[in-house]
């Protein structure tokens, strides 16, 4: 019941305030200016796919949203909490991370914990759920991503595709308001990419707000509400997928797409 | 006086009751020293890699000093040297335990540092991204994995330290070697007694190896 109330509130405020807002964010790695005056907003329920070449800064961008990467100037607002430059966010950092889920390229499951414990650890330690409650939630989520019969196994006993679906269930167990995906299928064997994308598609259809960094252009076109093209630490162009893929305005976008869509 | 060039099994067996009186001391110094050394090692190892910059150099100094000087010199310093500073004598057993704790602690802090640093960065990121605090991420995710990787190196250190306690015969702790020396002084059965002492050390170190390999195997299954 609580859940429906918050969702209702979220829908009401969606128009007025985005769930994520990056405001003139700058980040340097030494001499490299990896994020240049980035402005980006994401509305509640929106699916934003970020594309660009390797090293363009697209992963860095979403890693800033949950504070895994510090930035040097500007500000990032996530669900009403503010992340400040140079790691000066204080308590809001953990508060943001509690509400934002993330799926990594390398899965990053905890190898010393069973699949079920991977999913229940954070709900128990952060949300204070009992083991019983957390187990029940975990079993439901594992069923949803199609891993229900593997809950007592350990991560290394699962295929890459299965591991990534567990990672998705693990993030969802915290009931996040926003999900970040950092190249979730890049480390997978080709035959396993589909099952992970299916799980993500389902999540998008359920109305989850998502920011996705991916090289899967077909998936981006199908699922995205908006596609953002990043080049050399700058947002060069953004728009609905049909517009961006079929009629890219900027020559950088055209060059990138002609390279990735050719094969 | 008659010389016996044969290995005299009876003499070896006869020495056992006297030698075994030293066993509790060897075990006490070893395990108390290693237990304290483990705590010391964790503290200094984590200081070395922790977020607080000014805590790093004391950890570096500690490791370099106690890893770079012989444990024999350390125990002599503690037993004969420190009383001059403290104005009172130090119990030989205490000095032995302290020397093992400080010496093993220096090596263990490097083992801890290596173990923790060997855990992939993604593990920490995954923990933090789930809303776990940095200490929770360390406790539930990093440390259990690091500890498992540290077991072989900790086993090595345990064996080295157990053998190091044999040096403490010089400060008069009645451990295995000291007992042996006293016994030989009366019986002149050096061959048999040192052989038995070697066997006793081997029994201790093999037990430790066995226990650790069981622990490791159990740990790998989860």
Image (tube, rainbow, N blue to C red):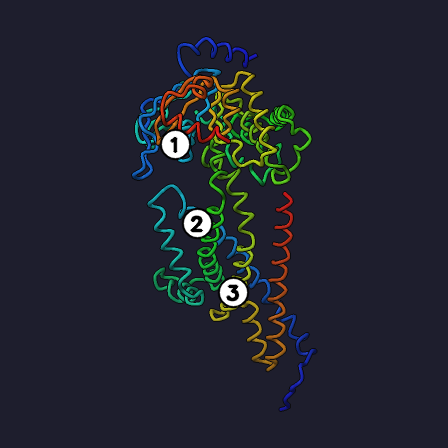
Q: Is residue B118 above or below residue B82?
A: above
Do the dots labelled 3 and 1 sit on one chain? no
Whole-angstrom CA distance, mark 1 to mark 2, is 35 Å
As drawn, is B92 to the left or to the right of B13? left
Q: Does dot 2 land on a helix, a strand or a loop? A: helix
Q: Chain of mark 3?
A: B
Residue B124 percent location from the top left of the image: 48, 37
Q: In the picture, which quadrant includes the C terminus of chain B?
A: top right
Q: Which mark is residue A57?
A: 1
- Nearer the N terminus, badge 2 or badge 3? 2
- Residue A94 visible: no
Residue topped by disc 3: B165
- Residue A257 visible: yes
Q: In the picture, which quadrant includes the N terminus of chain B?
A: bottom right
Residue A168 percent location from the top left of the image: 56, 28
- Between residue B163 and residue A126, name the one nearer to us: A126
Q: Chain of mark 1?
A: A
Q: Which mark is residue B45?
A: 2
Whole-angstrom CA distance, mark 3 to mark 1, is 57 Å
Residue A10 percent location from the top left of the image: 47, 12
Which quarter of the picture shows residue A26? Answer: top left
Which residue is at a point 51% across and 67% down the rendered structure image?
A: B173
């Amino acid at each position: 019941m609580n859940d429906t109330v918050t969702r209702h509130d979220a829908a009401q405020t969606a128009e007025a305030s985005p769930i994520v807002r990056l405001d003139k964010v700058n980040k340097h790695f030494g001499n490299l200016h990896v994020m240049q005056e980035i402005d980006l907003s994401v509305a509640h329920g929106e699916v934003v796919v970020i594309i660009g070449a390797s090293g363009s800064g697209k992963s860095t961008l979403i890693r800033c949203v949950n504070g895994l990467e510090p930035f040097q100037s500007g500000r990032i607002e996530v669900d009403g909490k503010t992340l400040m430059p140079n790691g000066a966010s204080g308590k809001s950092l953990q508060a943001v991370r509690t509400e934002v889920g993330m799926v990594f390229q390398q899965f990053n499951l905890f190898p010393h914990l069973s699949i079920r414990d991977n999913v229940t650890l954070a709900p128990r330690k952060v949300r204070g759920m009992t083991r019983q409650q957390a187990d029940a939630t975990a079993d439901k989520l594992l069923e949803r991503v199609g891993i229900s019969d593997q809950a007592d196994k350990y991560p290394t006993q699962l295929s890459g595709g299965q591991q990534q679906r567990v990672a998705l269930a693990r993030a969802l167990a915290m009931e996040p308001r926003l999900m970040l995906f950092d190249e979730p299928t890049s480390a997978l064997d080709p035959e396993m990419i589909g099952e992970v994308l299916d799980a993500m598609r389902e999540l998008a259809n359920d109305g989850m707000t998502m920011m996705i960094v991916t090289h899967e252009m077909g998936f981006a076109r199908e699922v995205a509400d908006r596609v953002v093209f990043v080049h050399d630490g700058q947002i060069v162009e953004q728009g609905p997928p049909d517009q961006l893929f079929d009629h890219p305005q900027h020559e950088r976008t055209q060059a990138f797409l002609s390279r990735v869509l050719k094969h | 006086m008659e010389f016996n060039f044969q290995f005299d099994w009876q003499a070896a067996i006869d020495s056992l009751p006297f030698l075994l009186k030293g066993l509790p001391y060897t075990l006490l110094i070893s395990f108390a020293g290693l237990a304290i050394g483990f705590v010391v090692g964790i503290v200094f190892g984590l200081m070395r890699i922790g977020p607080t910059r000014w805590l790093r150099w004391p950890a570096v100094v500690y490791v370099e000093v106690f890893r770079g000087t012989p444990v024999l010199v350390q125990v002599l310093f503690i037993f004969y040297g420190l009383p001059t500073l403290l104005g009172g004598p130090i119990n030989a057993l205490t000095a032995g335990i302290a020397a093992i704790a400080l010496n093993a602690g220096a090596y263990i802090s490097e083992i801890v540092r290596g173990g923790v640093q060997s855990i992939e960065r993604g593990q920490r990121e995954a923990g933090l991204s789930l809303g776990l605090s940095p200490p929770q991420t360390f406790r539930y995710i990093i440390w259990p994995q690091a500890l498992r990787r540290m077991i072989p190196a900790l086993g090595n250190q345990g064996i080295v330290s157990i053998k190091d306690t044999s040096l403490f015969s010089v400060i008069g702790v009645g451990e295995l070697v000291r007992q042996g020396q006293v016994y030989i002084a009366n019986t002149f059965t050096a061959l048999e007694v040192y052989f038995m002492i070697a066997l006793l050390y081997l029994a201790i170190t093999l037990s430790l190896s066995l226990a650790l390999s069981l622990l490791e195997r159990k740990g790998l299954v989860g």
